Image: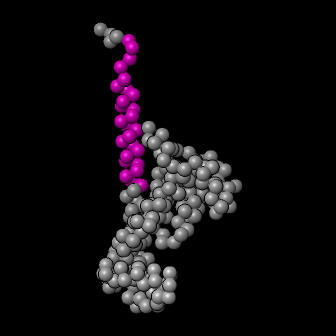
């Protein structure tokens, strides 16, 4: 069953509650429905976790937790899926969101060279006396394009991942059921 594999990959309730931020929600996390590994709870968690992953702020896990509490979704799965955006994937995802938004509202698309220069300026600003990139690139970057594109990308990716999860779960369950039906019994065939 897919449940055994998922349980081994996802954090335990004790591990999740070790976080200082999440300890605030401990009374609400006592509901056993938030920890069930059934297809309905996990499927809702996929939608919530993937959608939360596209928020460009450090509170992605908090958003996924609140969504799980509201919709009674599996908490470990929703929290784990927020790591779709991590230090390696966030730049391409955010660029794709900006590109989609810029095409929709007809804003100028940023070149990769400009993005590299913005990242370099941001690092210099954080680590030393560099110019503030939020002032330097004020007219170049469209926040509206970024927000619109990232929202569209988040919703579409969430729907695709949720439907794919449902299809894979169904396929694995059917294959598992068919394998159980094909097991030969100890009795000789009746003639």
Colour logic:
one colour
Q: Which range is magenta?
A: 162-187
Q: Could you tell me residue 171's position as x and y percent?
A: 36, 42
Is residue 154 rendered magenta in the image? no
State which quarter of the image contains the N terminus: top left
Dominant secondary-structure state across the stretch colored magenta:
helix
Q: Could you tell me residue 108's position as x and y percent?
A: 32, 85
Seen from this angle, which residue lies furthest front? Answer: 128
Please give left or right for residue 101 compared with residue 4 in the image. Answer: left
Residue that appears at 36% across and 31% down: 178
Seen from this angle, which residue lies furthest right? Answer: 27
53 in relation to 137, above or below: above
Q: Could you tell me residue 120's position as x and y percent?
A: 40, 81
Residue that appears at 41% across and 88% down: 137
Residue that appears at 39% across and 14% down: 186
Residue that appears at 29% across and 8% down: 191
Q: Is residue 164 visible?
A: yes
Q: Is residue 142 visible?
A: no
Is residue 180 rendered magenta in the image? yes
41 in relation to 103, above or below: above
Query: Which of the 4 image quarters holds residue 22?
Result: bottom right
Seen from this angle, which residue lies furthest top? Answer: 191
Residue situated in front as seen by the camera: 109 or 158: 109
138 in relation to 182, above or below: below
Q: Could you tell me residue 188's position as x and y percent?
A: 34, 10
155 in relation to 13, above or below: below
**Numbered label tally:** 0
């Amino acid at each position: 069953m897919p449940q055994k594999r998922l349980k081994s990959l996802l954090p335990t309730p004790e591990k999740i509650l070790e976080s200082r931020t999440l300890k605030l929600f401990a009374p609400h996390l006592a509901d056993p429905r938030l920890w069930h590994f059934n297809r309905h709870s996990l499927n809702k968690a996929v939608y919530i976790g993937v959608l939360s992953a596209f928020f460009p702020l450090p509170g992605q896990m908090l958003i996924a937790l609140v969504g799980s509490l509201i919709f009674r979704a599996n908490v470990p799965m929703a929290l784990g899926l927020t790591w779709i955006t991590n230090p390696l994937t966030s730049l391409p995802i955010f660029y794709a969101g900006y590109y989609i938004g810029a095409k929709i509202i007809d804003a100028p698309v940023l070149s990769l060279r400009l993005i590299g220069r913005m990242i370099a300026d941001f690092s210099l600003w954080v680590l030393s006396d560099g110019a503030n990139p939020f002032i330097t690139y004020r007219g170049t970057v469209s926040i509206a394009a970024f927000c619109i594109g990232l929202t569209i990308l988040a919703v579409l990716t969430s729907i695709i991942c949720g439907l794919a999860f449902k299809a894979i779960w169904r396929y694995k369950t059917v294959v598992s059921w068919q394998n159980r039906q094909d097991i030969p019994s100890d009795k000789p065939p009746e003639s």
